[in-house]
Image: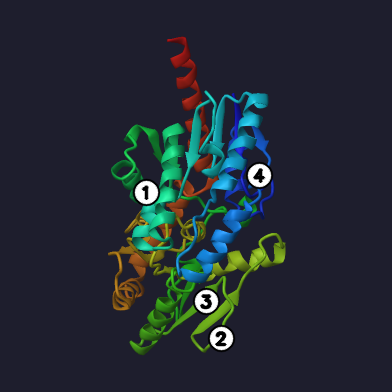
Amino acid sequence: MRALYVAYKHDPRDPMAGSGADHYFFRALTNNGIDVEISEPSIGKLHFLETGVRQLHRRFSSFRYAKYPISRVLAASRALNRIVIESKPDVIFSLYPPPLVFLRSAAPVIFRTDTTFIGQERDWPLYDSLSLKYCVWLERQVFDRCAIVITHSTWSRSILVDDYGLDLERIVVFANPAALPPQTVPPSVAVPGAKRIEYPIRLLLVGRDYRRKGIDKAIEITRMLNSAGVPSRLTVCGLSGNSTGNVEFAGQYDKSDPTQLKKYTDLYSSAHLLLHPAIFDASPIVTSEAAAFGTPTITNDVGGLGTSVKHGESGIVLPKGSPVSAYVAAIQELVGNPERYYTLCRTTRLRYERELNWESAGKVLADTLRTVHERHVASKID
């Protein structure tokens, strides 16, 4: 079976391109015996009229312009159609809508999305009404062409079914795996060991969007814990800022640098808890990375977080929009009951070993492509 991996902005062979998602999906396929051809990244040039419209939009609107301008959609679709004629793939896989919108191919399509535009807009509005309608239209064109849509949460799956009309059997769900080189993940985590409850409690937040990732909330949680007599210290990884006695801004780490990568993973290893009080997050990777080190996550049930973190197994999932006081109470209860905390550390690591790694997720991904191909071949025989 030959799969065509449809790139858009980033080269999947480059582990440092974009968020790294392209690389991990590409590597998961090749590691599982799929013969993969890559269509080179092609976003096309923005039409001069759209350039003008975008400038006006930026000037007069506080909302974002449509994510995928139609001139780039047309260019990406044309480029892909040419490649498909020459390549004749058995299946087509992509993480991006534009090349697929006007695709003309009998080969079955597998498309991955962490969130739909409708789902995102409900919890984290970004677009004006016209841009949103256009973005949703693009998605619908792609979904109509898909044999399977892969997503990373039951929340996203529900929206695909209820708002986009997809059948359940056309949706595959697995949590977003950790994006860490295998050699950086310890073969096991000794508990209590590095997780032994001692003060100050070491809290970690990994994120770059101050408000959406809840960094302001995390700082307030840390302040309230200390005021309540629970000495705590928060490290914020991903942003620079003014560090105080109880809050340290660690900045960003270059994961291509072995020394910086080691410092990055050491943060997960030494933390007691990953704090993720996000306003919205469709499918975080950091919760899976923390799980690799037996570090549970404290979060709330918004977006895909209820799938990324299983309540009572790999962390604590509070109700959506929970106040700071609820996080404080949950942390107090955990650190006040060390055996419960240590059990949670163990089950967190076990969940990583079972499903939050690319070896496990890659098998699901490759099996999905093979199943789609087999069904397509069988349908032609019938």
Front residue (pair 45, 304): 45
Residue 156 marker: 1
Q: Earlier in the sequence, mark 1 or mark 3?
A: 1
Q: Secondary structure at mark 2?
A: loop
Q: Find disc 3 in the rendering and name its residue.
A: 235
Residue 242 marker: 2
- Compared across the picture, whether 334 is left or right of 90 comes to left
Front residue (pair 339, 141): 141
Q: Find disc 4 in the rendering and name its residue.
A: 42
**Cα gap from disc 2 to disc 3, whole angstroms:** 12 Å
Instruction: Determine whether label 3 and label 4 are within 8 Å by CB.
Output: no
Q: Measured from the top left, where is residue 240 in percent x and y?
A: 59, 78
Q: Earlier in the sequence, mark 2 or mark 3?
A: 3
Q: Measured from the top left, where is residue 122 in percent x and y?
A: 34, 59
Q: Nearer the viewer, mark 1 or mark 2?
A: 1
| Amino acid beneath label 1 | Ser
**Cα gap from disc 4 to disc 2, whole angstroms:** 40 Å
- Compared across the picture, whether 327 is left or right of 98 comes to left
Q: Measured from the top left, where is residue 220 in percent x and y?
A: 39, 82
Q: Earlier in the sequence, mark 4 or mark 2?
A: 4
Q: Secondary structure at mark 4?
A: loop
Q: Is residue 224 positioned above or below 326 on the image? A: below
- Compared across the picture, whether 16 is left or right of 21 comes to right
User: Residue drawn 61% across and 66% down?
Assistant: 264
| Amino acid beneath label 3 | Thr
Instruction: Determine whether label 4 and label 2 are within 8 Å by CB.
Output: no
